[in-house]
Amino acid sequence: MSIFPLPIFERDEDPAHRDAMTDAEIYARLKAPTSIVVKFGSIKLIGEYPYDGSAKPGCGSRLVVKTHRGTEVAEMLTTTCPNSGCSKSISRREMLEYVENSGGKEYPFHTNGRVLRVATIEDLNAWSARRERFGREELDAVRAEAESMGFTMKIVEVEPVLGGEHVTVHYLSEERVDFRELVPALARRFGARVEMHQIGARDEARLTADYEKCGQHCCCKNFLKVLKPVSMKSAKTQKASLDPLKISGRCGRLMCCLRYEDETYEELKKRLPKNKSRVGTSDGPGTVIDSKILVQLVLVRLDHNGEDVAVPVEELLPVDACPQPAAQPDPFRGMGRRDVARRTGAQGRTNEGRGSKDAQQQGFKDAAKAADTQPKARAEGERASQASGSAGTPASPGTPASPGTPASPITPGAPGTGKKRRRRGRGGKGRGSGNGGTPGNNAPNTDLHSPRESDGGDAGGGDSDADD
């Protein structure tokens, strides 16, 4: 079955009847770049080199580049010339600003070299074979050679170049190493100039690691070129977990993203109010109890109801300018006492049927006064009954009656009778009584004592036994 072209497709192929150009036409109008920015080497060095070829490579193309180390295979990043026509190209001024902001003189930026050509299939195959051989066989040979000479350093990687004129040995060591014997031996083996490059724990992760816990390539392997120390202050500013297993990278040190994100966190933190400061919201004034740096939210506890609300930092108001909350209406306004008691569950506790407060207080005072006067009245009644009972009794034998006072007979159980009585006291006042039953050198023991007084005894007398 033959295919017949539709007239509408033939019309679209004619540039006179189209508003936009095809991709092939756009590429044909592009000019070849005059300078290209590339990255090369295991540590991903950056270089800007001139280019005088006619090909028009794009970002990610493999190029053969002459660098300060030799002939290498590099990856194209972008162009710095304005005549390339690519939308991803940047100016040289922007490139230099990026280098300055990324570390300045410490940034591995090189300009001594040039781009030779776009890499061919043969160049890529030769480069892959050389890199595989140096990654296995030659690496084991260098480690064995270093061990035989007594070196305790750790050989991490042996990196060749495409031309074979330069070999870099990356090693990890905490002490200074003397390579006067090792370097000539390796130079004879490789037939090239050997460079011993000492690296740290972070550079080792850059050479050997692949992915981090976030799921992305390690920052040091992907784009981060200057590896500066990271402090715990950055982790505290970002409110990250202080667990070493969660904030440490593949190298065992604090993650690099804590450092290059620290400046952003510092700028965002300056916009947030401090904790326990007074702020105003659309719901009323309150106190800041917490804040979130990335989302720029502030948790405010309102004054009038104690409720916690999350407010964006852009919506915060001064305390004097924020709206004041209206007073809450009384839910029991206009209701009777019985309705209020029924609503609140306090039936039977209303004030209906109760007297006034003054009457209640007077009743309490009368009851307290009556309770105080009852013991006094009872004591006075007992004294009066005893006095009336002793007035009509004859005087006891052997004791003269006082003038004007009838003598009281000695009755059993009464004070002064023949029943023994012990008195407690101090000194010898009560111990001088004679056999006749009268205390010695004292008045006759004819006093009438109330039951309360007789129980306590004489406070100043001693113990005595009297026989009447």
Image (cartoon, helix red, strand yellow):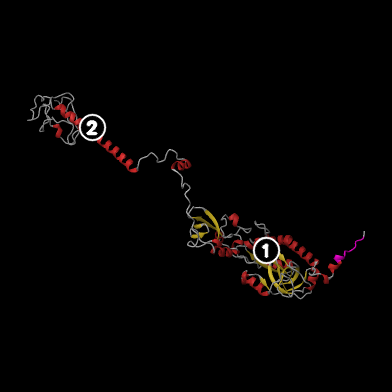
Q: Residues within 10 Å of mark 2 (few under 14, many from 20)?
A: few
* Type of amino acid at the residue the image marks with label 2: Arg
Q: Nearer the viewer, residue 429 or 311?
A: 311
Residue type at numbered disc 1: Asn
Residue 317 spot, x, y in % from top left: 52, 62
Specify start and end residues of the magenta stretch as a single range. 2-9
276 and 128: which is toward the camera: 276
Image spot of residue 457 (x, y percent): 19, 33
Residue 336, position in %: x, y? 45, 43
Residue 222, numbered label: 1
- Locate the C terminus and report the quarter of the image it occupies: top left
Work out whether residue 155 can be spotted: yes
Mark 2 or 1, nearer chain start: 1
Q: Is residue 247 above or below residue 388?
A: below
In what quadrant of the picture does the N terminus appear?
Answer: bottom right
Compared to residue 197, the image places residue 356 above or below, namely above
Question: Can residue 163 be seen in this snapshot?
Answer: no
Residue beneath disc 2: 378
For numbered disc 2, what is the local secondary structure?
helix
